[in-house]
Structures are given as structure tokens and as C-alpha cells.
Image (cartoon, grey):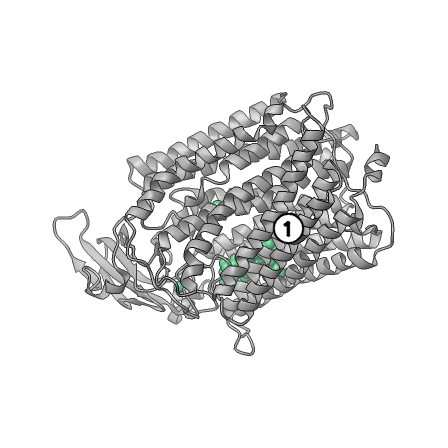
């Protein structure tokens, strides 16, 4: 079996396309990580940025590069490799579409980056109107999204081709999961594309004078929440399918994995109002409805947690573990491909719990826009998700470049994961604590006119600087490992681990492949949650806002 | 599709806990009236200074309403008007705010007073100041280069 999976390597031509995405992603990690370091240093109050660089310019670099560029490029590269591996090499036409998408997205990234560096777009990665960035910044972001649509088309074409060639068969699990994430992305990006193309671009070009803020924010958050699930689902792909193979066991249940992905597709989109709970202009009953829909993702999350721990436990027991937690000892802690994503899984437990606080109709008011929120998503996206991406990188990059992960690199990779965990415990912990005391997010160092309350936050900011500095060392290590695996590691064959289902005989129900049904329900839920409040926002719209450049 | 017995128990337990949790949130929202600030009124952002009540920012006693005072704030980059204000201890106050330019936050540190302020919209929230002291008002939504300097002060006095 090992032989079979080794022999079906990702074709070198597809590998090149994937790797192109990873070069961009890890460049973003390096520069974005440096920005993160500068932020924690400035916020400690002991350091000032040189050359008149503004804090918010640095923060825009950090958010755009890590929140948008690193994630999107890594995911597209991973999707392509996973689909090529499990559904077969891309056709020349598919690969060409993929390359076109890559170049469009890269040109867009460079355009947006240049505008940020010229200080023409210090609007942070959420670019809330009516802060008005340069038109080329919006155009650049549009191109990133358009490029991602080309890559989405590749995944959809390959999936359709596989289904035609294998009638009546459920698609390979990794392909199925990549397809779900792709479909969710396509439905979600309609929102951000609409506000950018219809509202922000014409306004920044001076074609219209004002912008409707309520509508722009609603379109943005229609996209913004599924965005975080777009980051998360590739990590779930690795947790469900790759990690079991790495530790030497089977996928707990193929069908349940598919079902949980479908539930994520349904409940990730009609929920953007939980980011707008404290906003005027939206009726609280509609906010509450979306809060309920938000919480329904608890169900697939519980399924995921169960299946992961069941996998670990049954593996441990098969190795003779006894007692309630004896199986923990049997896990391959020395293998970074397992341990680093595992640290991510552990971080997701407090991360998820904090998310439930944030999404609660009333508790949100305690933490909204405090640094607690930043602490929260550094556990979810910046630990659970990125450590899993790193765990994938350790085998995927050498697999694609025809090299191997050496013992020495594996050790460095473990060190990297542990440093990340330690640094993040300090930084995120201090952010959570300071947030509960009221310290705001997205704020440069300030004594707030000598207010006694603000003085209490400063020790926590120093703790964040300590944690952030450790994190930055971990970032440097990761970039070093990536460069080694891409260019210098010894030539060889590195396995692309794809787990098989425990019960091969039990075929996944074909209803899971019925996209008319699932996309239909997705659209109905969106219409249900958004139609009336959206019409309200249009009908009761105030005069538009002129906005401008305030930095 | 087969589901393990333990997984069924786990999911039944989880979903029940979720339903209880959502019921608590719902009762709190619709029965006890603990809704997040969601005012539906609008204002022309260009005419804030001449539109009541924003033409007279500050604290005003009111009669015949569910609250005793109205506290009006106007936000603009990078300041609030009034820059500081005194509120009598124990007063039930409706805070009313809007902005003349971009989006701002309105947070009173150490309390649950927290809302978004958006151009064209009026934000409202009713609260009782029942602990004396000096409270820092700050902007918690990025609004430009002076964002972290944007403050006001509420003194709750006997
Ligand atoms: C060296 C590691 C890192 C450090 C030291 C760091 C530090 C920070 C700090 C201090 C902030 C908040 C600043 C503020 O609100 O004023 C921040 C924001 C943020 N970070 Fe990180 N971070 C790191 C890694 C990451 C990673 C890996 C990701 C994503 C994958 C990430 C995503 C974000 C995002 C999206 C924001 C929000 C930006 C905004 O509010 O506009 N960070 N980071
Ligand atoms: Cu969300
Ligand atoms: Cu501000």
C-alpha cells in the first residue's frame, strides 16, 4: 500500500504550479512576521518606528500579507496538489488556467502591496469604507480574487472530469473536501467583489462622491466569516485525512467527514451579522437569527473533534495502550508532521471556546474590538490553522520538489512548533486578559491622556512583546525550513500521506455529491438570512458618506 | 451511513447543550430586552452639527422617558465632543452618538458600553452609571493616524 501511494506522485508540472503559490505564501510569512514583531515592540511603549513609518501602515502590511496573501496562496497551492494527487494529473488546459489565475493574483498582490508601501492605502486588511484607499489598492485586491476564481475553476473542472470517468462513484475524499472549500469561496467572494466593484472602486476613482457604509459592511461580512472557514477547512483536510496516515492508522469515517464538510458549507455563509452585532441600521431580530445559524457550526465542529480523538485513541489502543489516557503516550511525538498540527488542534480548543463568546448576542459587547479579539484569532488562524499548514509544508514541499525531510529538519520543525506554542501562549494570553480590561485592538501605543485604566494595560503589552518576539524567531525558523525543503534538502522521495477509510466496504452515500441540492440549500439559507435586512438597509439608507484619507 | 454509539451520545449531549445555550441567549434578548445596540434612525452626516440632538452635545435631563438623562456624543477624527462630561451617580442614561466622517468606536473602558458609530447612522444604548469614578471613553475602531489619541472622559459623581 505504501508503494502504491509513493508511486502516484504529484506530476512535476502540477508540482511547479503548487510551488509557485508556496513561494508567495512564505515570502508573505517573512515580511508579515516582521511587521508583527514591529507591532508588538511599538505597543510595548519602548520602541518607535524609524523613518516616519506609521503604525497603521505596518498593521496593514501585517493583516494583508498574513490574513489575505499567506492564507489564500497557501490554500490554492494545497488544493491543487491535493486534487492532482487524488484525482489525477491536471490536463494541459486545466494547468494553463491555473497559471493564468496565479499570475493574475500575483499581479494583484503586487499592486495592492505597492499602494500600501507608498502609504496610499493604510486602511487595514478590512478596508472599511469610508476610509478611502487608492483605486489601485482596490483593483489589486479584485485581481487577487479574480485569480483565485481561475484556480477554483481548475478544481471544479478536475472534479467534474473525475466524476465523468467514474460514474456512480464517490469522489476521492481530499478532492471532495477541496471542492467544498472552493465552492464556499466562490459563493462568499461574490460579496466582497460586489462592494469593491460596485461601491469602492467607482468612489475611489471619483466617479461617485459618496458610499453607503451599511451596505458595504454587510457585503464585506457576508464574505468575512466564510473567509475564516476558507482558512480553516484546509487544516481540517489535513486533520481528517493526512494526520491519520502520518501516525499509521485509518480515517475514522469517510462519510462523516463528508457530512461535516457539507454542514460547514451550509452554515458558514449566512452568518456575517455576528461581526456587526454592535452596529446601527440592522434589526436585532435578524442579528439574533444569524447568531443561531452561526452556532450551528458547533455540530460539525463536535463531529470533527470526536473523529480526531477517536482516531488517536484507537491508534494508541491498537499499539497496546491502556488506561483512560494511555494512548497519548503511543502517539509519534517525534514526528513534526504529526506534532506541529497537533499543537494546532490543541490551540483550537480555547480558540473555539473564545469564538463562542464572541458570537454570543450579548457577550460580544464585552469584547468587541478589544485586543481580546486579536488574541482569539491568533489562536485560531495564527496557530491552529498556520501550524497545520506548516505541518503540511514539512512533507508536501519536499514531495513536490523531489526532496526529503531530513532528521535534522524534522528536529528544527519540532522546535519551531514548540517556540510558536510558547510565544503564542504569552502573546495571545496577554491579549485576552488586556481585552477583558477594555484595551482596544488596532491601536498604536497610547497612554490615553494619562488615564489610570490605560496604565493597567501596559504590563500586558510588554508580555505581548515578549511572546511576539519568540513568535518572530519561530517565523524565521519556518522560513529557513521552507527554503531548505524547496532548494537544499537531499534528493529523494517524500510520501504524500493520504489516509484510507476504516471501512472500505461502506461507500459514502452518493447524495453527498449532489451539488444542486447542497448549493440550493446554501443559497436558500443565504436568502433567508439576508434578503429582508438587506432590503431594509437599501430602503432606509442615509445620505452616503464622503469619507477620505485620514492617515 | 454508520455512526459510532459514542459519537451519537457525544452529539446528543453537544446539541442539547447548544440548544440550552441558545435558549438562554434568546430569552435574554427578547424577554429581558438585552439586545445589542441596533438603533435604526439615520442622520445626514454632512448636517450633524445642525441636526438635533447633535447640535447640543453633552448631558441633558429629560422628562417622561424610561431614562433620566440623554448623553449626546459627536465623534469625528480624532476627537469626541464633549471631551469630558460629568454624570450623576445612579443616573439612567441614554447614550446617543453619531460621526461626522468615518467609522469610529464608542467604548467606555471597564463597562459594557461598547458600540459602533457609523456615518449616516445614529447609535444608541441605555445604561445606568452605578459606580462612581472616572471612566475612559475611547475609539476602538480604526479611523486613521490619530485613532489611538481619540478619547473622552466620563466622571460619575455623587
Ligand atoms: C510573528 C508572529 C506574529 C506577531 C508578533 C503578531 C502580532 C500581531 C499584533 C500585535 C496584532 C494586533 C495589532 C493591533 O491590533 O494593533 C496583530 C494583528 C493581526 N495578525 Fe498577527 N502576529 C503574528 C502572526 C500572525 C499570523 C501568522 C497571522 C495570520 C495567519 C496573523 C494575522 C493577523 C491579523 C489578520 C491581524 C489583524 C490586523 C488588523 O486588525 O487589521 N498574525 N498581529
Ligand atoms: Cu465570524
Ligand atoms: Cu478610531
The x and y percentages for residue A74 are 65, 51
Spot the residue most to the left: B64
Q: Residue at x 57, y 45 (%)?
A: A230
Query: In the image, is the residue at mark 1 within 8 Å of ligand 1 by its beta carbon?
Result: yes
Q: Toward which corner of the image does residue A550 lie, by quadrant?
A: bottom left
Q: Is residue B65 above or below residue A479?
A: above
Drawn side of residue A125 relative to residue A81, left or right? left
10 Å neighbourhood of mark 1: few (<14), some, or many (≥20)? many
In depth, the one of A548 and B121 nearer the eye is A548
The x and y percentages for residue A18 are 71, 50
Q: Residue at x 43, y 56 (%)?
A: A437
In depth, the one of A135 and B97 nearer the eye is A135
In depth, the one of A205 and A243 nearer the eye is A205
The x and y percentages for residue A350 are 55, 44
Q: Toward which corner of the image does residue B79 lie, by quadrant?
A: bottom left
Q: Is residue B100 above or below residue A247?
A: below
Question: Can residue A186 be seen in the rendering of this structure?
Answer: yes
Count of numbered tags: 1
Is disc 1 placed on a helix, strand or loop? helix
In what quadrant of the picture does the N terminus of chain A appear? top right
Spot the residue most to the bottom: A51
Q: Residue at x 20, y 56 (%)?
A: B70
Q: Chain of mark 1?
A: A
In depth, the one of B90 and A444 nearer the eye is A444
In what quadrant of the picture does the C terminus of chain A appear? bottom left
Question: Can residue A131 be seen in the rendering of this structure?
Answer: no
Drawn side of residue A479 relative to residue A44, left or right? right
Rendered-image quarter of ligand 3: bottom left
Q: Which residue is mark 1?
A: A386
Spot the residue most to the front: A93
Amino acid at each position: 500500500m505504501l508503494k502504491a501511494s509513493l508511486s502516484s506522485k504529484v506530476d512535476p508540472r502540477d508540482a511547479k504550479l503548487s510551488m509557485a503559490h508556496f513561494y508567495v505564501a512564505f515570502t508573505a510569512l517573512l515580511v508579515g512576521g516582521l511587521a508583527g514583531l514591529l507591532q508588538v515592540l511599538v505597543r510595548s511603549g519602548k520602541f518607535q518606528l524609524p523613518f516616519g513609518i506609521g503604525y497603521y501602515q505596518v498593521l496593514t502590511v501585517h493583516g494583508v500579507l498574513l490574513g489575505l496573501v499567506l492564507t489564500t496562496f497557501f490554500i490554492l497551492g494545497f488544493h491543487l496538489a491535493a486534487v492532482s494527487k487524488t484525482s489525477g494529473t491536471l490536463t494541459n488546459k486545466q494547468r494553463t488556467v491555473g497559471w493564468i489565475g496565479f499570475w493574475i493574483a500575483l499581479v494583484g498582490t503586487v499592486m495592492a502591496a505597492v499602494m500600501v508601501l507608498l502609504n496610499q492605502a493604510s486602511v487595514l486588511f478590512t478596508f472599511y469604507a469610508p476610509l478611502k484607499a487608492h483605486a489601485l489598492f482596490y483593483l489589486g485586491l479584485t485581481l487577487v480574487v479574480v485569480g483565485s476564481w481561475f484556480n477554483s475553476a481548475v478544481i471544479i473542472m478536475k472534479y467534474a472530469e473525475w466524476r465523468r470517468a467514474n460514474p456512480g462513484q464517490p469522489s476521492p475524499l481530499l478532492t471532495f473536501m477541496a471542492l467544498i472549500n472552493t465552492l464556499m469561496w466562490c459563493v462568499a467572494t461574490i460579496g466582497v467583489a460586489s462592494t469593491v466593484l460596485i461601491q469602492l472602486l467607482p468612489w475611489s476613482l471619483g466617479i461617485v462622491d459618496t458610499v453607503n457604509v451599511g451596505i458595504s459592511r454587510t457585503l464585506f461580512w457576508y464574505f468575512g466569516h466564510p473567509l475564516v472557514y476558507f482558512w480553516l477547512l484546509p487544516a481540517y483536510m489535513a486533520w481528517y485525512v493526512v494526520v491519520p496516515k502520518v501516525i499509521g492508522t485509518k480515517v475514522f469515517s469517510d462519510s462523516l467527514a463528508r457530512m461535516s464538510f457539507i454542514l460547514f458549507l451550509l452554515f458558514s455563509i449566512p452568518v456575517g451579522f455576528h461581526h456587526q452585532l454592535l452596529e446601527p441600521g440592522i434589526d436585532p431580530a435578524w442579528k439574533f437569527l444569524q447568531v443561531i445559524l452561526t452556532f450551528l457550526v458547533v455540530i460539525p465542529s463536535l463531529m470533527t473533534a470526536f473523529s480526531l480523538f477517536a482516531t488517536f485513541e484507537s491508534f494508541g489502543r491498537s499499539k497496546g495502550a491502556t488506561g483512560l489516557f494511555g494512548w497519548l503516550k503511543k502517539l509519534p511525538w517525534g514526528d513534526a508532521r504529526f506534532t506541529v498540527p497537533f499543537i494546532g488542534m490543541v490551540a483550537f480548543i480555547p480558540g473555539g471556546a473564545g469564538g463562542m463568546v464572541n458570537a454570543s448576542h450579548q457577550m460580544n459587547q464585552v469584547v468587541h474590538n478589544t485586543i481580546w479579539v486579536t488574541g482569539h484569532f491568533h489562536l485560531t488562524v495564527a496557530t491552529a490553522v498556520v501550524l497545520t499548514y506548516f505541518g503540511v509544508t514539512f512533507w508536501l514541499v519536499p514531495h513536490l520538489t523531489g526532496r526529503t525531510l531530513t532528521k535534522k529538519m524534522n528536529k528544527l520543525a519540532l522546535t519551531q512548533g514548540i517556540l510558536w506554542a510558547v510565544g503564542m501562549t504569552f502573546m495571545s494570553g496577554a491579549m485576552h486578559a488586556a481585552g477583558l480590561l477594555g484595551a482596544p485592538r488596532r491601536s498604536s501605543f497610547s497612554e490615553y491622556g494619562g488615564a489610570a485604566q490605560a496604565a493597567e494595560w501596559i504590563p500586558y503589552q510588554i508580555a505581548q512583546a515578549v511572546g511576539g518576539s519568540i513568535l518572530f524567531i519561530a517565523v524565521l525558523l519556518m522560513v529557513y525550513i521552507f527554503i531548505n525543503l524547496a532548494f537544499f534538502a537531499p534528493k529523494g522521495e517524500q510520501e504524500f500521506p493520504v489516509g484510507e477509510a476504516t471501512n472500505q466496504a461502506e461507500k459514502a452515500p452518493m447524495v453527498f455529491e449532489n451539488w444542486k441540492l447542497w448549493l440550493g440549500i446554501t443559497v436558500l439559507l443565504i436568502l433567508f438570512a439576508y434578503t429582508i435586512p438587506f432590503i431594509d438597509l437599501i430602503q432606509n439608507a442615509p445620505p452616503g458618506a464622503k469619507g477620505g484619507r485620514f492617515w | 451511513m454508520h455512526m459510532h454509539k459514542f459519537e451519537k451520545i457525544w452529539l446528543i449531549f453537544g446539541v442539547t447543550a447548544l440548544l440550552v445555550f441558545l435558549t438562554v441567549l434568546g430569552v435574554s434578548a427578547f424577554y429581558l430586552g438585552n439586545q445589542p445596540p441596533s438603533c435604526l434612525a439615520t442622520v445626514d452626516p454632512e448636517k450633524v452639527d445642525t441636526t438635533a440632538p447633535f447640535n447640543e452635545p453633552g448631558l441633558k435631563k429629560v422628562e417622561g422617558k424610561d431614562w433620566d438623562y440623554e448623553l449626546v456624543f459627536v465623534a469625528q477624527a480624532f476627537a469626541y465632543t464633549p471631551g469630558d462630561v460629568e454624570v450623576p451617580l445612579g443616573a439612567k442614561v441614554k447614550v446617543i452618538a453619531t460621526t461626522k466622517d468615518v467609522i469610529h468606536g464608542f467604548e467606555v473602558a471597564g463597562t459594557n458600553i461598547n458600540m459602533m458609530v457609523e456615518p449616516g447612522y445614529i447609535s444608541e444604548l441605555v445604561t445606568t452609571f452605578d459606580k462612581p469614578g472616572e471612566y475612559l471613553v475611547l475609539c476602538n475602531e480604526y479611523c486613521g493616524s490619530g485613532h489611538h489619541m481619540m478619547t473622552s472622559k466620563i466622571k460619575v459623581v455623587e
